[in-house]
Image (cartoon, rainbow, N blue to C red):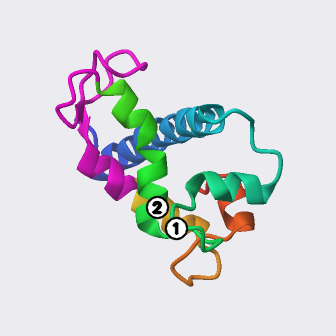
Amino acid sequence: MHSPRRTNRISVVAWAQAQGFLFQIAVVFLLGQGPTYAQTHNDYLDSFDGDGDKRVSLIEFQKAMSWAFEQMDKNGDGVLSSEEQLVPKAKPFTLKEHHERLAIQFGKQDRNRDGFLSAKELAAPPQM
């Protein structure tokens, strides 16, 4: 039997790997949605910035980063089953769980802690 510390470490690593995977997929899908690819930090920000205020709120981040989830959720039930994921034997998870993970990621990206992501913060590599 695994110790709680070891099990938690394994769970965190598995979560981080899955989260990073979904982040990469979402970025690829977001950049490929429009007629052109993002060329600058500001172009990238614009793909997330729903209200045009040149900063990204948590809600905007979650909406943009959920596009891939929604595309993968073939039956539209709000759950990515093992069959709908690209990772063999992956644990199913809900859109709500995905949003919770994105909120954690958003907090890590928000380096100045102002509650928004700037173009520079958004374009920074994901923090684990």
User: Eyeballing the image, is 84 above or below 127?
Assistant: above
Rendered location of residue 108, percent (x, y): 55, 66
User: Eyeballing the image, is 84 above or below 40?
Assistant: above
Specify the quadrant of the image occupied by residue 37.
top right
Q: Residue furthest left?
A: 77
Quarter of the picture holding the C terminus:
bottom right
Viewer-proximal residue among 62 and 53: 53
Would you say 64 lies left or right of 100 here? right
- Magenta stretch secondary structure, dominant: loop
User: Eyeballing the image, is 112 above or below 74?
Assistant: below
Q: Secondary structure at mark 2?
A: helix
Q: Which residue is mark 1?
A: 51
| Mark in front: 2 vs 1 | 1
Rendered location of residue 30, percent (x, y): 58, 39
Magenta residues?
74-101
> Residue at point 54% right, 32% down?
25
User: Eyeballing the image, is 82 above or below 11?
Assistant: above
Reply yes or no: does residue 76 show up in magenta. yes
Rendered location of residue 64, percent (x, y): 48, 49
Q: Amino acid at mark 1?
A: Asp
> Residue at point 52% right, 67% down?
51
Q: Which residue is mark 2?
A: 60
Quarter of the picture holding the N terminus:
top left
Q: Is residue 81 visible?
A: yes
Q: Is residue 104 visible?
A: no
Would you say 81 lies left or right of 47 here? left
Q: Residues within 10 Å of mark 1 (few under 14, many from 20)?
A: few
The answer to whether the residue labelled 2 contacts the one labelled 1, judged by CB atoms less than 8 Å apart, is: yes
How far apart are the alpha carbons under marks 2 and 1? 9 Å
Q: Amino acid at mark 2?
A: Glu
